[in-house]
Amino acid sequence: MNQEQWTAVDRYITETVVPSDAALDAAVEASAKAELPPIAVTANQGKLLQIFAHLVHARRILEIGTLGGYSTIWLARALPDDGRLISLELNPKHAEVARGSIERAGLSKKVEIRLGRALDSLPKLATEAKGPFDLVFIDADKASIPEYFNWSLKLSRPGSVIIVDNVVRKGAVIDADSSDEDVRGVRRLNDMLAVEKRVTATTIQTVGSKGYDGFTLALVNSLT
């Protein structure tokens, strides 16, 4: 097994099980044209996020890290007519590209993109009582994952699902002596999860067109 085969399998899965559409294709093209980093979720991963949102009957979704809005579109499509998704993005250029793609997808009434540091925006969401959120997708800088996760818990309810992307780091997560801040952030999250009684969590390793990585899935049991 190698990267070429992983990519070929992803392509096969996408072509057979996850057909594309104009809005999603346009979002990918807009991100590429704007030279955004090619780190968005793949189509099959986007559909998995959408399925998770359906499973929890999500009416409110929080996304930490918008990038070009590709994952945002997948998640927002799972919402009912009166559903709401709030996405937090630090980079103004990314937010601009995402807003255009979300508008083309016909989802502007359901999606709000908030510009600024997530660690500044999250306390404001709590003050504004925008939660509880039924699903939280964390896909931002990994060094701050533990702080994002703590705020996600505060903004959740029993039964909410929190998904954290890119937590295997090509296997580097097992290096206790790593100086990489992203790896250290993921390891701090895992240390938290080892003792956190408010959630039931697991981590799944993945391979695909984006390489070797994985995601953490946490079910909120209680808030105390």
Image: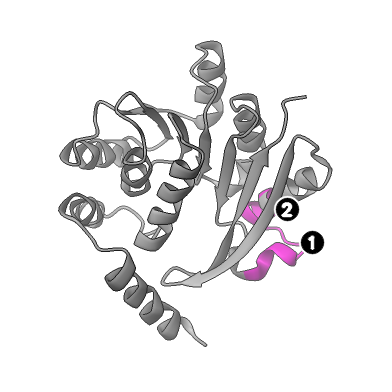
Q: Is residue 177 magenta?
A: yes
Whether 42 is among the magenta residues is no
Q: What residue type is labelled 2?
A: Arg
Q: Measured along the vertical axis of the image, is residue 121 above or below residue 20?
A: above
What separation in Å lies between label 1 and label 2 (alpha carbons)? 8 Å
Left or right side of 210 for 131: right
Please provide the residue range marked out in magenta.
171-185
The residue where tag 1 is placed is 176
Q: Residue 73, percent across and down?
A: 31, 43
Judging depth in this view, the residue of 111 and 31 nearest the camera is 111
Seen in the image, is 136 located left or right of residue 51? Answer: right
Type of amino acid under label 1: Ala
Query: What residue do we see at 35% from left, 42% from top?
Result: 72
Q: Mark 2 points at which residue?
A: 187
Q: Which residue is drawn at 53% across and 23% down?
A: 120
Q: Is residue 146 left or right of residue 129?
A: right
10 relative to 192 in the view: left or right: left
Which element type, helix, strand or loop, lies under badge 1? loop
Residue 208 x/y as whole percent: 46, 72
Q: Is mark 2 on a helix, strand or loop?
A: helix
Q: Residue at x 61, y 66 (%)?
A: 205
95 in relation to 204, above or below: above
- The crowding category of the residue bearing disc 1, from other C-alpha atoms within 10 Å (few below 14, some 14 to 19, many at least 20), is few
Asked if labels 2 and 1 touch by Cβ distance under 8 angstroms, the answer is: yes
Tell me the quarter of the picture where residue 221 sits: top right
